[in-house]
Amino acid sequence: MAVNRVPVLKRCRSLGLEPAYLGIDKKSKRELKRSNRKTSEYGQQLREKQKAKFIYGVLEKPFRNYYERADQMKGMTGNNLMSLLELRLDNVIFRLGFARTRREARQIVDHKHVLVNGKQVNIPSYQVKAGDTIEIKESKKSSPRYKAENGILAATSGRLVPEWLEADAENLKGSVKDIPTRAAIDVPVNEMLIVELYSK
């Protein structure tokens, strides 16, 4: 599988993105020095797509597939695209506070720690639905990484769980109450520019 080896903070700087959106509380002390050259319309559209791909950890081909699915759904394509990305299992694990970062959430899913409606799922891109229950396996709950004192839960305790999810941090369980609306997604991406880019 393709892996992006560019340091995370460097990538955040180049995209003008706060590392907090990836669950990283570090900040780069370097400043990005840009020339005063104006970014073209295509450049702006490409940048928004790269931001969305980077935040959710999605490569080009799957991202294109998300766009095509969103385009076939009812409603606005941009809003549908953001909802599909938010409903990825690795993102939901991150949003519930069971992982410090989206990368760690992906690893938790990959390592078969997660049950969806009582069944083991180890596919980070798995699409959860309204009404689904997500939990960490009983056998993995005793792992030091999930300990309330110094594990993931301690690190993510200040993070707000979005309104479309319900979390039970003590029992490492959560549920999807509803499909997220664009207003409930706090990601700094202009999805309309992505739609414009793909619809050319």
Image: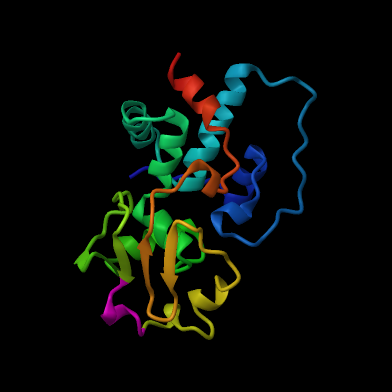
Estimate the x, y position of residue 145 in percent, counting from the top left: 44, 78
Instruction: Identify the residue at image location x=39%, y=48%.
Output: 179
Residue found at the very far top of the displayed protein: 200
Is residue 195 in the magenta section? no
Image height of 137 relative to 17, above or below: below
When asked about the image quadrant of residue 174, the answer is: bottom left
Name which residue lies at 60% across and 44% down: 11
Front in this rendered view, residue 94 or 16? 94
Q: Position of residue 46 (x, y in %)?
A: 54, 26
- Taking the spot 36% from the left edge, 50% from the top edge, the residue there is 88
- At a point 44% along the width and 21% down the height, the residue shown is 198
Q: Which residues are magenta?
A: 136-142
Q: Is residue 74 left or right of residue 43?
A: left
Q: Quadrant of the N terminus?
A: top left
Percent of width and height locating residue 159 = 58, 66
Q: Which of 29/94 is in front?
A: 94
166 to the left or right of 28: left
Foreground residue among 73 and 42: 73
Q: Is residue 185 visible?
A: no
Q: Is residue 68 above or below residue 176?
A: above
Position of 54 compared to 65: left or right? right
Which residue is situated farthest in the left direction here? Answer: 119
Q: Along the line of sight, which residue is nearer the eye, 70 or 11?
A: 70
Question: Which quadrant holds residue 141?
Answer: bottom left
Colouring of the image: rainbow
Q: Position of residue 136 (x, y in %)?
A: 32, 72
